[in-house]
Amino acid sequence: MSRRKDRERFQRIKEQNPDYTGFRGADTVVEESAPPPVLESIVCSVCQRRRNVPVDTLPEDRAEYVCLRCQDGLYQWRGFATAVPGAPFVDTLLAALKEASGLTPWLIIFTYYLVEGLTVLAERYLRSRYAKGRVDERQQWIAWNQRREEAMREGREFTEPPPASDGDKAK
Ligand SMILES: [Zn+2]
């Protein structure tokens, strides 16, 4: 902090508290602040990444340690899973999670990515498929109708089945 800012700060505090005698030096602050946390290097039981974690936040059984990033993922997953109405597979997965109340890490990660990732992807895929299907179908109908009108103009017999029944045949 600059000297000018120090002076301004002193004046500001002095106005509120006439007894204020000034900042007592950097040493005082170091003594008053909490000591830096003792870190321990530990492997997350979910993602297997090594993290440096304050010792006082670690579980007694170090093998149960789940890093903040994975905890966040689990938290998001839970929020997502409970926010989807009428999704029976989510209920099934939640039930499975409760069954494995030891919070089997791979199951959490698997279901997290399954629900969070795959359903979003699947939804997008289906939506794009649906949209594409609609466009294709419409174009098929337009083309069919053009051929039909052409045949009528030329006085030909038009026997081509419409696109929908064509699609049925393909199945
Ligand atoms: Zn992790």
Image: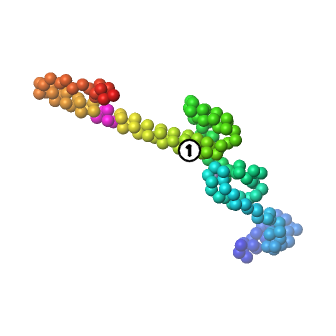
Across the whole image, how many numbered discs are drawn on residues? 1
- Magenta span dominant secondary structure: helix
Taking depth in this image into account, of 31 and 103 the one nearest to the observer is 103
Asked if residue 107 lies left or right of residue 171, the reply is: right
**Quadrant that contains the C terminus:** top left
Asked if residue 165 lies left or right of residue 102, the reply is: left
The picture quadrant where one finds residue 169 is: top left
Taking depth in this image into account, of 57 and 140 the one nearest to the observer is 57
Asked if residue 90 lies left or right of residue 126, the reply is: right
Mark 1 lies on a secondary structure that is: helix
Please report the bounds of the magenta region as a residue range.
135-139
Residue named by callout 1? 113
Residue 168, magenta (yes or no)? no
The picture quadrant where one finds residue 35 is: bottom right
Residue 138, magenta (yes or no)? yes
Q: Residue furthest left?
A: 154
Q: Position of residue 27 (x, y in %)?
A: 81, 73
Seen at 51% across and 42% down, the residue is 118
Q: Position of residue 57 (x, y in %)?
A: 75, 54
Seen at 24% across and 25% down, the residue is 161
